[in-house]
Amino acid sequence: MDFLEFNRDQPTGAYRLGMFEFQPTRIAEREARVRDGRPMGPVEPALRSALAIAYSLEGRPADAAKQLREACRLAPSEAQLRFQLGLA
């Protein structure tokens, strides 16, 4: 787990951490990571996208859409985020 935390500020590290936390029992940790207020820089949209997927799986579409709207605001050139928002 330490290597996941060490690389979390890099895009691939954020992705790996998000996939690790994709487990349904770890959704609270993912929420805390997004809400703790620490600057996440360029990885924040990816983490918000991962959280939105978790919300969708939990049957929380409004929360998922909120996270994806924020991810789109942070990374307006990322077409994949807009696509996910359309599906939410």
Image: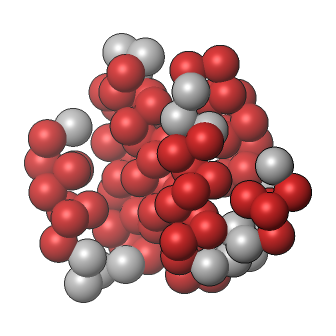
Q: Is residue 60 above or below residue 85?
A: above
Colour convention of the picture: secondary structure
Left or right of 7 on screen, residue 81 = left
Left or right of 31 on screen, residue 15 = left
Picture coordinates of residue 87, whole percent (x, y): 14, 41
Picture coordinates of residue 67, whole percent (x, y): 44, 49
Quadrant in which residue 40 is drawn: bottom right
- Work out whether residue 37 can be spotted: no
Quadrant in which residue 10 is drawn: bottom right
* Total numbered labels placed on residues in the image: 0
Residue name at image x 73 percent, y 50 percent:
33
Report the quarter where the C terminus lies.
top left
Residue name at image x 43 percent, y 16 percent:
58
- Work out whether residue 31 can be spotted: yes
Residue name at image x 56 percent, y 20 percent:
24
Task: Looking at the picture, tell me which residue is in the foreground, 45 or 61.
Answer: 45
Left or right of 53 on screen, residue 21 = right
Q: Is residue 54 above or below residue 8?
A: above
- Furthest toward the right, the residue is 2
Q: Is residue 69 above or below residue 61?
A: below
Picture coordinates of residue 50, whole percent (x, y): 46, 47
Task: Looking at the picture, tell me which residue is in the foreground, 82 or 4.
Answer: 4
Residue name at image x 37 percent, y 72 percent:
73
Picture coordinates of residue 49, whole percent (x, y): 41, 52
Quadrant in which residue 60 is drawn: top left
